[in-house]
Image: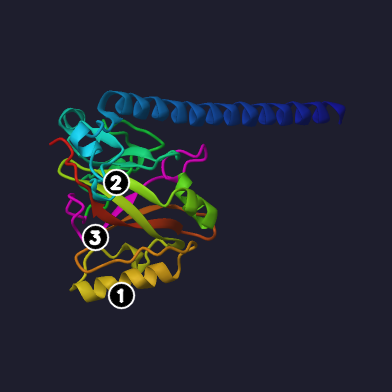
Amino acid sequence: MKKSVKILLFVLCAVFAGVFLFSGYKLFTIIHGYKSSERQYNSLSNRYVAAAPSASPEAAEQPEETRQEVSPIYVDFGELKNECPDIVGWIYSEGTPINYPIVKGGDNDYYLYRDIYGNYSGNGTPFMDMNCRGDFRDYNSVVYGHHMQDGSMFASISNYRQEGYYEQHPVMYLNTPTMDYRVELFAGYVTDADSNTYTLMFPDSASFLLYCREMQAQSNFATNVEIQPGDTIITLSTCSYEYYDARYVVQGRLVPLGNKAAA
């Protein structure tokens, strides 16, 4: 009987040790993945993204109300696209972790767990819905990004549940190879993965404006941003955990700025 107890204790110790080692290995790989992804994006940003050039002396002398707003960052898309031809834009939100390239693949799976070079990455890469045209001129351009536990990728957009966070970060900026935009956020909310939030095309401007009003009505924050005929929007989407297949999205009106990004 004593021998049986000793064997049982030995087996249990072995099992617990195995679980501990496996858990430690998984934790190591997760943290290593976070760090590797962070290094990669920092490298891209350091090489291809810079503060926007200062306005010319002539522009600085103009009255403030007549000056053209520019994106706070400049992106060298000519060189960046040499490394990854699938890149279609760069999304930036000052004072938040949002500072990433946006890619567009041939489907909505490829970049879920791949970096911009096509290598495996648990963080994936923010990517545009495959059914969008890629130039952000659709009525609604949808971009997906993971909700990482270290707060990276699109995890921080869930902070828009709080009105105060919106007040601190009411705009983002989107740079593309042909145009830069101010992203005026007008809605943030939890939704289903298959909800009409992800509608990309609309038969006419009236139906699109109705859609935008419906999205704004469920927003966690209040805003006076009004979508006008001829406007286009961007939808940033990430996982949320209120229920199975929940998503948190923020949506913003794309306002073209005076400067063009490098082609």
- Nearest the eye: 144 or 69: 69
Q: Quadrant of the N terminus?
A: top right
Q: Residue furthest left?
A: 263
Going from N to C along the chain, the mark reached first, 1 or 3, is 1
Q: Which mark is residue 240?
A: none
Magenta stretch in the rendered image: 131-154
Separation of residues labelled 1 and 3 (CA atoms): 13 Å
> Magenta-highlighted stretch: main secondary structure?
loop
| Label 3: element kind | loop
**Residue assigned mark 3:** 232
Going from N to C along the chain, the mark reached first, 2 or 1, is 2
Q: Quadrant of the C terminus?
A: top left
Is 92 rendered above or below residue 201?
above
The x, y position of residue 178, in whole percent, is: 15, 43
- As for residue 105 lying within the magenta part, the answer is no
How many residues crowd around disc 3 within 10 Å: few (fewer than 14), some, or many (20 or more)?
A: some
Separation of residues labelled 2 and 3 (CA atoms): 27 Å
| Label 2: element kind | helix
